């Protein structure tokens, strides 16, 4: 929905959604997590092993990715498995597509005086 030049996604302003998503993607370790989860879900211990980081450090980054809606998790016994929330990536993609498909920026200038 577009109202007052602020897009909304499921009742939440897209600005907050987009900012959280791009913030989450701004860290190299979090990008590595995303890349590992592109093909299949992984548990925390598998992610720690493949990334060579301790669980405390990884948990911090997983929390940011989850809060941004980019990851989801499920518990199986004592293990937590993480996987991508592809629909949230679609929100970010749609946001960027708006710039790709927009009209060229006007070069005519009015006097600022």
Image (cartoon, rainbow, N blue to C red):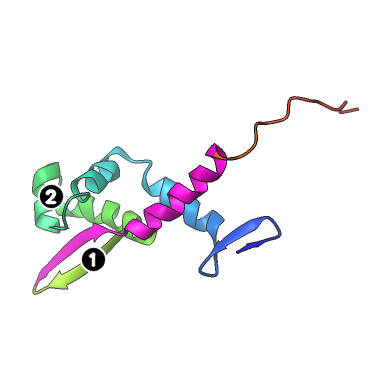
Instruction: Name the residue located 16 percent from the left edge and 58 percent from the top edge.
Output: 41
- Residue wearing tag 1: 73
Query: Would you say residue 109 is visible in this rendering?
Result: yes
Tell me where residue 17 appears, x and y as whole percent.
Answer: 48, 57
Instruction: Name the residue located 20 percent from the left edge and 69 percent from the top edge.
Output: 74
- Residue wearing tag 2: 48
In this orientation, which residue lies closer to the viewer: 53 or 30?
30
Residue occupying the far right of the picture: 113
Q: Does 55 lie within the magenta span?
A: no
Q: Does 81 lie within the magenta span?
A: yes
Dot 1 lies on which element?
strand
Viewport quadrant of the C terminus: top right
In this orientation, which residue lies closer to the viewer: 101 or 95?
101
Query: Would you say residue 70 is visible in this rendering?
Result: no
Gap in angstroms between the C-alphas marked 2 and 1: 16 Å
| In the depicted structure, whether residue 13 falls above or below residue 101 | below
Q: Residues within 10 Å of mark 2 (few under 14, many from 20)?
A: some
Q: Is residue 106 left or right of residue 69?
A: right
Instruction: Name the residue located 79 percent from the left edge and 25 percent from the top edge.
Output: 108
Q: Disc 2 or 1, which lies upstream in sequence? A: 2
- The magenta segment is 78-100
């Amino acid at each position: 929905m577009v109202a007052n030049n602020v897009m909304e996604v499921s009742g939440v302003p897209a600005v907050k959604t987009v900012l959280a998503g791009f913030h989450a993607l701004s860290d190299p370790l979090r990008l590595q997590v995303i890349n590992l989860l592109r093909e299949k879900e992984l548990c925390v211990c598998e992610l720690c092993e493949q990334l060579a980081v301790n669980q405390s450090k990884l948990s911090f980054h997983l929390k940011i990715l989850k809060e941004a809606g980019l990851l989801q998790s499920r518990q199986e016994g004592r293990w937590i498995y993480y996987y991508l929330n592809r629909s949230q990536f679609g929100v970010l993609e749609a946001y960027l597509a708006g710039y790709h498909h927009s009209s060229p920026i006007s070069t005519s200038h009015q006097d600022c005086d």
